[in-house]
């Protein structure tokens, strides 16, 4: 009987008869290796593979990335945005139609009518940067500052 000492693995995986991969933690593997089922698998020459991968992705290796573009607005944004608003919205709508901008809109304190900034969600960092370069709100001084951050979506409604 083959035995893999617990200190040599973090996670064991095996394929069941339906082809699904099963991820087993250390305690589960130890329980499995001492059970009659482990002898059944060995008799059918199915192989348990020791691996150092994890059953989850860490937040340091951002794989499901989006990019948050945050704007800071001038206090008199409502009075000054008028001549530039249509072009600003059309630029965002174009990127939404292309699928590279997911959403966007003004932000501010709850209950306050004047927005203090805006938030946009992009699928690509370069598109967020180009949006800033092309945005008439930025060109005409309505945006006083901006930042682009990576955002790893861990949970969301499907």
Image (cartoon, rainbow, N blue to C red):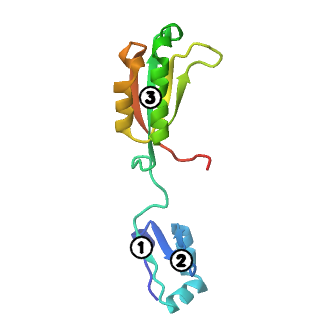
Is residue 147 placed above or below 150 in the rendered structure?
above
Real-space Cα distance between discs 1 and 3?
51 Å
Q: Position of residue 134 (x, y in %)?
A: 36, 25
- Which of the two discs, 1 and 3, labels the residue nearer the N terminus? 1
Which secondary structure, mark 2?
A: loop
Which secondary structure, mark 3?
A: helix
Rendered image: mark on residue 50: 1
Does residue 81 appear in the picture of this structure? no
Residue density around tag 3, few if under 14, some if 14–19, many if 20 or more, within 10 Å: some
Q: Which residue is mark 2?
A: 19
Real-space Cα distance between discs 2 and 1?
18 Å
Q: Which residue is mark 3?
A: 91
Between disc 1 and disc 3, the foreground one is 3
Q: Looking at the picture, tell me which residue is in the foreground, 103 or 134.
A: 134
Q: Position of residue 135 (x, y in %)?
A: 39, 23
Residue density around tag 2, few if under 14, some if 14–19, many if 20 or more, within 10 Å: few
Left or right: 17 in relation to 134: right
Does residue 109 appear in the picture of this structure? yes
- Which of the two discs, 2 and 1, labels the residue nearer the N terminus? 2
Q: Looking at the picture, tell me which residue is in the foreground, 82 or 14.
A: 82
Q: Looking at the picture, tell me which residue is in the foreground, 76 or 1.
A: 76
Is residue 127 placed above or below 140 in the rendered structure?
below
Rendered image: mark on residue 96: none
Is residue 153 placed above or below 134 in the rendered structure?
below
Between disc 2 and disc 1, the foreground one is 2
Which residue is rendered at x = 49% and y = 25% of the image? 89
């Amino acid at each position: 009987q083959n035995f893999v000492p617990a200190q040599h693995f973090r996670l064991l995986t095996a394929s069941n008869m339906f082809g699904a991969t099963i991820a087993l933690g250390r305690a589960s593997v130890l329980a499995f290796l001492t059970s009659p089922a482990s002898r059944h698998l060995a008799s059918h020459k199915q192989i348990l593979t020791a691996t150092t991968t994890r059953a989850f992705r860490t937040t340091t290796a951002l794989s499901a990335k989006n990019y948050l573009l945050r704007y800071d607005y001038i206090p008199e944004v409502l009075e000054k945005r008028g001549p530039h608003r249509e072009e600003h919205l059309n630029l965002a709508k174009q990127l939404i139609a292309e699928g590279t901008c997911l959403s966007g809109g003004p932000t501010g304190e709850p209950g306050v009518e004047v927005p203090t900034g805006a938030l946009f969600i992009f699928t690509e960092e370069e598109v967020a940067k180009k949006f800033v370069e092309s945005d008439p709100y930025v060109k005409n001084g309505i945006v006083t500052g901006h930042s682009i951050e990576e955002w790893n979506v861990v949970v969301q409604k499907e």
